[in-house]
Amino acid sequence: MAILRPDGSQAISPTAHYTGYVWTRNGLSPPELATTEGRLLFESLRPTMIVSDLLGGGTLESYLLARHRAIDALLERAIERHGVTLVVEVAAGMSGRGLRFTRRHGQGLTYIEVDLPGMAARKRGQLARLGALSERHRVEELDALREGGPGSLEELMASLDPTDGVAIVTEGLLGYLEQDTVRALWRRFAATLGRFSHGTYISDIHIGELQNLRVRVFRVMLSVFVRGRVHLHFDDEEGVVSALREAGFASAEIHRAADLSGDGADAAANLAHTLEAVAT
């Protein structure tokens, strides 16, 4: 995922490098999607993660894996149960999800990865080297926070077939954003998904009621890692569901990521939650 600096310039988020390396390390992405920056970040944090794990707090790696696998499980379910044939992953970063899902589902699925120009160019180049780009798997430049016009989600979605079942996926994006920005983003997601025969939104979500001392320490670690504040937008699951309904989704559900990913033995994995919201 790319981020915008206060001066308007772009930078690739350190989490995009780190997570790209984590996915590769755990067989979820090919080596080509890992970066040198990601490996260096991972190794620099390894001593801290070892101490955290020994103290019963788990590791950032296990947290990210639970989150990632849970989103995979929800997306697979949307494809199988609701006939999703088109996926738009917003702020996709160096995730290998698009590659895995297009290989798994072949001609039955179109996967569009979108990000800011710098990250989109880097991802497109790596996928091109793998021979993975096609009409059914492509990378587009898009600013998720732009409201309409060129380079916006609305413009992209208007170009797609309304008879498709569509899923929008975000991972690791919401924590960077203020609550009002998240609510506005959700309204746009609900409105655009409502144009299709079926529309599902899948994402990770941070929930405030889980904030005991261990979790607060983990949040501080995350904030230092991403070089900025990790926002907590809602105190409980009911608050998330209510906000999604207010944004225009017909239904919404919160899932404990470990229940979907099978990573429940790890303390950090148990902190991860995902949301699933249906527009149509």
Image (tube, helix red, strand yellow):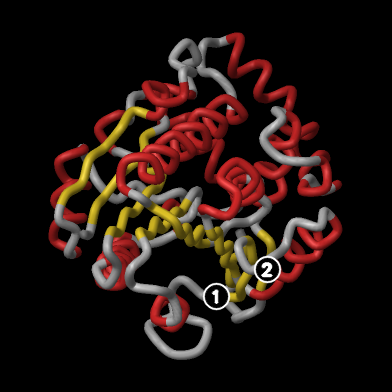
Three-letter amino acid code at disc 1? Leu
Q: Is residue 234 left or right of residue 64?
A: left
Q: Furthest-bottom residue in view?
A: 149
* Numbered-mark total: 2
Task: Give coordinates of residue 62: x percent, y percent.
Answer: 57, 25
Who's the residue at 66% across and 73% down the image?
Answer: 10
Residue 142: which disc? 1
Quadrant in which the N terminus is drawn: bottom right
Is 225 drawn above or below residue 133 in the view shown?
Answer: above
- Mark 2 near mark 1, Cβ–Cβ under 8 Å? yes
Q: CA distance from mark 2 to mark 1?
A: 8 Å
- The answer to whether residue 210 shows anywhere in this view is yes
Task: Give coordinates of residue 12: x percent, y percent.
Answer: 68, 62
Task: Give coordinates of residue 137: x percent, y percent.
Answer: 63, 61
Give the residue at mark 2. Answer: 120
The local secondary structure at tag 1 comes to loop
Three-letter amino acid code at disc 2? Ala
Front position in the image: 38 or 137 = 137
Is 102 drawn above or below residue 45 in the view shown?
Answer: below
Is 114 drawn above or below residue 65 in the view shown?
Answer: below
Q: Residues within 10 Å of mark 1 (few under 14, many from 20)?
A: many
Mark with earlier residue (2, 1): 2
